[in-house]
Image (cartoon, helix red, strand yellow):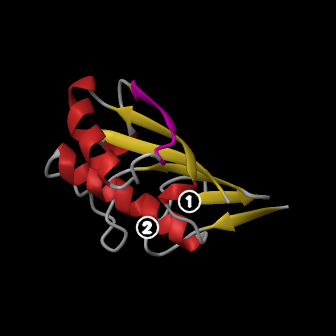
Amino acid sequence: MKKIINTNNSPAPIGPYNQAVLKNNMLFISGQIALDPISMTLNNGSIIDETHQVMKNLKNILIEAKMDFKNVVKSSIFLSDMSYFNDVNEVYGSYLETGMEPARETIAVKTLPINVNVEISMIAVT
C-alpha cells in the first residue's frame, strides 16, 4: 500500500498530484519549484534564490517522511537554460553530504511550470 506524503512546510501541489508518495521503503518526491509554501509566490530573484527555495521545499518533504538528503538515491534536475548549470549545481551540492550524493541527471527543457528556471524531483529510500 502506498502512503501519501504532504506537508504545509512545502508548497501545495498546483495540479492533480501529491508532494510525495511512499511505497514500502521508497519515497518518490514530485518535482519542486521555487514556490514559497506560505505565500505561494515565486522566490525567483535569481537562479540561486530559486534553487535554495527548491531545496528547502524538498528538505521539508523529506523531513515529513522522516528522512533527509542522505536518503536520496536519485535526483532529476530540469533547467530552463543550461547556462544556469553551475549556479544550480553549487547550491544543490551545498545541501548534500560529501560522498553521499545521489545519482542524477540534469536536463535543459523548453519551459517549466509557471515559467520557473529550475525544477528538481527526487527518489529516496530508507
Above or below for 30 versus 1: above
In the foreground, 11 or 104: 104
- Specify the farthest residue to the front: 99
Q: Is residue 99 above or below residue 70?
A: above
Q: Position of residue 97 (x, y in %)?
A: 40, 54
Residue with the most extreme right position: 1
Q: Quadrant of residue 10?
A: bottom left
**Disc on res. 19:** 1
Nearest to the observer: residue 91 or residue 39: 91
Label 1 crowding class (10 Å Cα cut-off): few <14, some 14-19, many 20+?
Answer: many
Residue drawn at the location 30% of the way across and 58% of the way down:
53
User: Which residue, given by chain and number where applicable, does mark 2 sit on?
Assistant: 10
Tag 2: Cα neighbours inside 10 Å, few (<14), some, or many (≥20)? many
Numbered range of the magenta stretch: 100-107
| Labelled pair 2, 1 in contact (Cβ < 8 Å) | yes
**Does 112 appear above or below 9?**
above
